């Protein structure tokens, strides 16, 4: 049955094999079927799917055979072993099933009930052999996964992600960076992989994506092993793109300051009248002014040798509206 599913050339063929031969289908066949459906749908959707722009299975959800497949998994998942449960959950996520679908809800509930009993091998093996954008994007977009600190999973992923990184989309890498930053998972191999990705592809990336990829370094005070190449590269990119996304530019600068790199030429730009005028015409002017004020204070404290322009006092505002507790500061900033 496994061979038949894997050799299927259409969505309908996969569904027929699974639904018309229930006596020959075991728990391990269900995630294989879901994963194969995802592959076939990705091929049908073409370049948009490869860029992570479309993850919804669309018409497949409406097919009676697909509903039969889902119902079979729902009915039997309580008897599945841990590995099959995890495989089904991740395959369903990679397929693009919505979080509110009955299948995903049941699988998440079953996973949550078993979370304490899961062997890390059950989790880490799922994508150790094939890390594709669609699957990784689905995992790191999952609220269940995002809310839990999966330190051992990240440690395991760090062993094979460097070999797969070139094939990831910027969006997927940004999701990974967001997760490790949120949970402060200071895994050097993974952080260096993000840094290498930035070094190789930084010029093609939007400032908002660069901001997300840089943030884990400053949050955990980690200077990547390639920092002597990366930081000058980021500085050159910011010189060209400073005005395209003012808030992202200021956030990247703050991250670099926290890592003791002071890009003087970019500071000249962000404190210039032209940049300020550009900021004031945007709907997020107050937010950018707050961060500019914080950056100006950082210059005063950290970069004593700087002699260029500073933020005009007219535009300085308080970064925080009121005193924050440590927990509030950690949660919000």
Image (cartoon, rainbow, N blue to C red):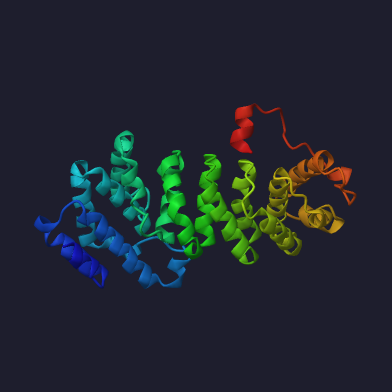
> Relative to residue 5, is residue 30 depicted above or below?
above
Using the rendered image of the protein, determine whether residue 283 is visible from the camera's viewpoint: no
Rendered-image quadrant of the C terminus: top right
Report whether 53 appears left or right of 100.
Answer: right
Residue projecting furthest to the right = 307
Q: Pinpoint residue 263: horizontal percent, then vertical percent.
A: 78, 53
The residue depicted at 63 percent of the width and 28 percent of the height is 326
For this rendering, which residue is in front, 219 or 332?
A: 219
> Relative to residue 211, is residue 325 depicted above or below?
above
For this rendering, which residue is in front, 267 or 271?
A: 267
Q: Pinpoint residue 105: horizontal percent, then vertical percent.
A: 32, 44
Using the rendered image of the protein, determine whether residue 199 is visible from the camera's viewpoint: yes
The residue depicted at 52 percent of the width and 58 percent of the height is 171
Residue 59 found in image quarter: bottom left
Residue 22 found in image quarter: bottom left
Q: Pinpoint residue 166: horizontal percent, then vertical percent.
A: 50, 64
């Amino acid at each position: 049955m496994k061979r038949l599913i894997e050799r299927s050339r259409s969505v309908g063929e996969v569904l027929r094999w699974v639904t018309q031969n229930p006596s020959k289908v075991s728990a391990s066949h269900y995630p294989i079927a879901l994963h194969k459906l995802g592959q076939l749908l990705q091929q049908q959707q073409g370049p948009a799917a490869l860029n992570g722009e479309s993850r919804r299975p669309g018409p497949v959800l409406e097919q009676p055979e697909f509903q039969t497949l889902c119902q079979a998994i729902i009915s039997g998942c309580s008897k599945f072993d841990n590995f099959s449960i995890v495989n089904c959950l991740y395959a369903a996520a990679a397929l693009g099933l919505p979080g509110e679908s009955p299948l995903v809800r049941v699988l998440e509930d079953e996973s949550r009930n078993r979370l304490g009993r899961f062997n890390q091998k059950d989790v880490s093996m799922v994508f150790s052999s094939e890390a594709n954008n669609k699957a990784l994007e689905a995992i790191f977009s999952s609220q269940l996964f995002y809310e839990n600190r999966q330190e051992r999973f990240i440690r395991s992923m760090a062993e094979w992600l460097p070999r797969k990184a070139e094939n990831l989309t910027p969006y997927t890498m940004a999701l990974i960076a967001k997760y490790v930053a949120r949970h402060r998972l200071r895994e050097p191999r993974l952080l260096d992989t993000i840094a290498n990705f930035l070094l190789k592809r930084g010029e093609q990336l939007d400032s908002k994506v660069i901001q997300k990829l840089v943030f884990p370094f400053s949050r955990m005070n980690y200077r990547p092993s390639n920092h002597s190449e990366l930081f000058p590269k980021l500085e050159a990119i910011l010189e060209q793109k400073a005005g395209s996304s003012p808030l992202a530019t200021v956030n990247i600068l703050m991250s670099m300051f926290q890592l003791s790199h002071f890009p003087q030429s970019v500071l000249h730009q962000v404190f210039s009248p032209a940049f300020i005028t550009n900021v004031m015409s945007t709907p997020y002017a107050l937010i950018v002014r707050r961060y500019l004020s914080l950056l100006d204070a950082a210059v005063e404290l950290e970069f004593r040798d700087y002699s260029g322009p500073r933020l005009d006092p007219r535009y300085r505002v308080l970064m925080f509206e009121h005193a924050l507790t440590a927990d509030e500061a950690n949660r919000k900033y």
